Amino acid sequence: LQAGKPAHMLNYISSHDTRLFDREKLAEAGAALLLSPGGVQIFYGDETGRPVGYTPNTDAQQATRSDMNWNAIDGKLLEHWRKLGTFRARHQALARGEHRQLSSAPYVFSRVDASKDDRVVVAMDVTGDVTLNVAGVFADGQTLRDAYTGREAKVEQGLVKLQAERYVLLERVH
């Protein structure tokens, strides 16, 4: 893309120059943003459910500049964003690793940064007992942790079985 050099991108869902992302879909948006390749920018309040501010007739963008909702933070939403952000901070593979789709329904992918031997598997929109194919990413016998729930499981015959709570963020236990 850039004369043979890697492309660098910055992703965001809201901006003071556009509008705030749909406040009813901030959990899904946080997952899409924080699990995306490239850099990410969080606009203040997207992680806490900050409401849209006053919108004057002359400039709709002013609604993006409301006060931070310090006294009305959505704790469940913030916890979700923190789990995703902490996982992202531990794994450069999310930002710059090679992406491979492992399943389309549910959507499961791996990202591997071979230069750092950093690898993750992510499953989106999964709940309850799940079995995920991690063959080629993690070896049989390896213990993995779901960074979203803290639960651990061993890889057996290329599969991991665990209890999911909407997202699965698999990483090696060292």
Image (tube, helix red, strand yellow):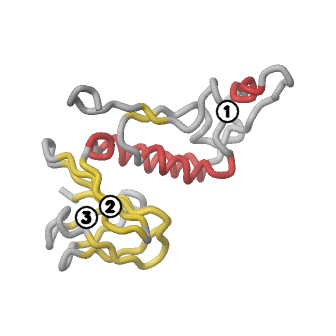
Residue 81 lies, with reference to residue 152, above or below; the image says above
Residue lying at the far top in this picture: please name it: 58
In screen coordinates, is 65 left or right of 143? Answer: right
Kindly indicate the quadrant of the structure image that contains residue 150. bottom left
As measured in the structure, the alpha-carbon distance from the residue carrying label 3 to the one carrying label 1 is 39 Å
Q: Residue at x 70, y 25 (%)?
A: 65
Residue 100 lies, with reference to residue 94, above or below; the image says below
Q: Nearer the viewer, mark 2 or mark 3?
A: 2
Is disc 1 in contact with disc 2, using a CB cutoff of under 8 Å?
Answer: no
Q: Residue 144: which disc?
A: 3
Image quadrant holding the C terminus, namely: bottom left
| Residue 39 x, y percent position in the rendering | 38, 34
As measured in the structure, the alpha-carbon distance from the residue carrying label 2 to the one carrying label 3 is 19 Å
N-terminal of the pair, mark 3 or mark 1, is 1
Q: Secondary structure at mark 3?
A: strand
Amino acid type, residue under disc 2 in the picture: Gln
| Residue 15 x, y percent position in the rendering | 60, 29
- Which residue was labeled with disc 1? 19
Residues packed near mark 3 inside 10 Å, few (<14), some (14 to 19) or many (20 plus): many
- Which residue was labeled with disc 2? 101
Q: Secondary structure at mark 2?
A: strand
In screen coordinates, is 75 left or right of 147? Answer: right
Amino acid type, residue under disc 3 in the picture: Leu
Q: Secondary structure at mark 1?
A: loop
Q: Nearer the viewer, mark 3 or mark 1?
A: 1
As measured in the structure, the alpha-carbon distance from the residue carrying label 1 to the one carrying label 2 is 31 Å
Number of marks present in the image shown: 3
Q: Residue at x 75, y 29 (%)?
A: 63
Is disc 3 in contact with disc 1, using a CB cutoff of under 8 Å?
Answer: no
